Image: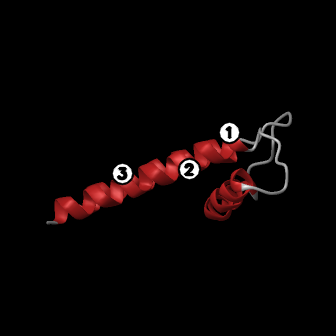
Amino acid sequence: MPYTIVLIIQRLFDIYGWLIVIWCILSWVPRTGSGFFDDLCAAISTLVEPFIGLFRRFIPPVMGVDFSPVVAILVLSVIERLLYNLLL
């Protein structure tokens, strides 16, 4: 039973990490202002922006490149590993 819970938590962390990657890719695509694509972008942004915003306050863009998503994914994987080691 505990292993199943740990596996579910790991999958949720993986999904959130992929959402960050998808959010980064979608940030390069211009938006039209309406439609399914824009609603999808807004939904992903609503899920990802609060977590990314934590790192944007401390990590300035370097030559116009925002590295906060990279740091966010690294921190997410560290938290995932810590929880895995604590729960098993």
> Does the image show residue 88?
no
Q: CA distance from mark 2 to mark 1?
A: 10 Å
* Above or below: residue 58 compared with residue 21: below
Q: Nearer the viewer, mark 3 or mark 1?
A: 1
Viewed as shown, does residue 81 lie left or right of 87? right
Contact? badges 2 and 1 (CB < 8 Å):
no
Q: Position of residue 87 (x, y in %)?
A: 24, 63
Q: At 83% across and 42% down in the image, what residue appears? A: 30
User: Label 1, on which residue?
Assistant: 25
Name which of mark 2 and mark 3 comes first in the sequence. Answer: 2
User: Label 2, on which residue?
Assistant: 19
Label 1 secondary element:
helix
- Which corner quadrant of the image does residue 50 belong to? bottom right
- Which amino acid is tagged 3? Arg
Outermost residue, left side: 1
Q: What is the crowding at mark 1: few (fewer than 14 residues within 10 Å), some, or many (at least 20)? A: few
Q: Position of residue 74 (x, y in %)?
A: 52, 45
Q: Nearer the viewer, mark 2 or mark 3?
A: 2
Which of the labelled discs sits on residue 81, or is there none?
3
Residue sitting nearer the eye, 12 or 86: 12
Q: CA distance from mark 3 to mark 1?
A: 26 Å
- Which corner quadrant of the image does residue 41 belong to? bottom right
Name which of mark 3 and mark 1 comes first in the sequence. Answer: 1
State the colouring used for the structure image: secondary structure
